Image: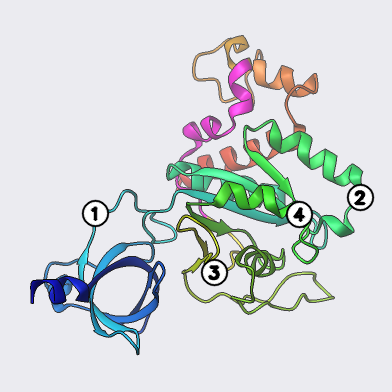
Amino acid sequence: MANEILEDIKKGKLIKGIAGFYYVHVPGDGVYECKAKGVFRKDGKKPLVGDEVELKCLDAEGKTGNITALLPRKSELIRPAVSNIDQALIVFAIVKPVPNFNLLDRFLIMMQSQGLECIICFNKRDIATEEEIENIRRIYEACGNKVFFVSAHKGDELEALRSEIRGKTTAVAGPSGVGKSSLINELCGCVRMETGEISNKIERGKHTTRHSELFALENEAEPTYLMDTPGFSSLDILSNEESIGRFYPEFDAYERDCKFLGCAHINEPVCGIKNAVAEGKISELRYRNYVQLYEEFKARKKY
């Protein structure tokens, strides 16, 4: 009898929650549709996408059950509200649309401020020039990030990217229209997501993702998940102007040449960062983004 009870209890990862139903992926057994026990509501606990859970199987053939326990979380993100994410994969297009590098820096800061390492993936390599690719590579590899250039439809250079996500739970972020859905479909090896159209007029994608959801890569030896989040057009950075500089690691080697302690690297007369920008040692594009974000947060404090 005890063995039968144990067989009814399964462990898995919560991959989606909609209208009170929770969908739990049990490796090697598929996805179960579950309800959460009322005890969670009484204790003020709410299951999050990414949670490791235990469920009691109600119907093995119909794949239904009840979530009976939330296992301890190793991490929890504020935005998006998910748990147990190991890293972020930030996706932008090289062209069509032209990258908004200020928005890219915002994504990097948002994810890094929550303790996530970031991989940057530039999609649509097949329609970009080598000059465009190398310009972007030079700027963002200098930030200490791993940078990949892929074509989701042709599968070029995707294996190296697969090795970076294998055995991990990876949040995929980026603006609409850059091919996130197509890339996830390619990495998963099948069509897992609805893909949106690109407006010929404004070269921006229609939002196709409505909620956070994990996708399991079934053919991997280790449990591997990708999470797509709803498309963003703007982001608030979880920081303030004094701390923004720490998310620009290429500044570190030159701050010792700043005359003033706590230098903002903007209006000070003797500044190692500004000198490095003038000498081409720090990307002018990244520096301009830094200044814009610094001034933006400084202005917010006045209100």
Could you tell whether 162 is left or right of 158 in the image? left
- Residue 166 visible within the image: yes
Could you tell whether 147 is left or right of 228 in the image? right
Please tell me the numbered disc located at residue 150.
4
Going by the numbered disc 1, the residue's amino acid type is: Pro
Going by the numbered disc 3, the residue's amino acid type is: Pro
**Residue placed most toward the observer, 13 or 48:** 13
**Residue placed most toward the observer, 116 or 233:** 116
> Is tag 4's residue or tag 3's residue first in the polypeptide sequence?
4
Residue interval drawn in magenta: 236-253
Q: Is residue 260 magenta?
A: no
The residue carrying pointer 3 sits among few (fewer than 14), some (14 to 19) or many (20 or more) residues within 10 Å by Cα, namely some
Residue of label 3: 230
Viewer-side label of 4, 3: 4
Please tell me the numbered disc located at residue 72.
1
Viewer-side label of 2, 3: 2
Up the image or down, 190 lies above or below 105; here it is below
Could you tell whether 202 is left or right of 286 in the image? right
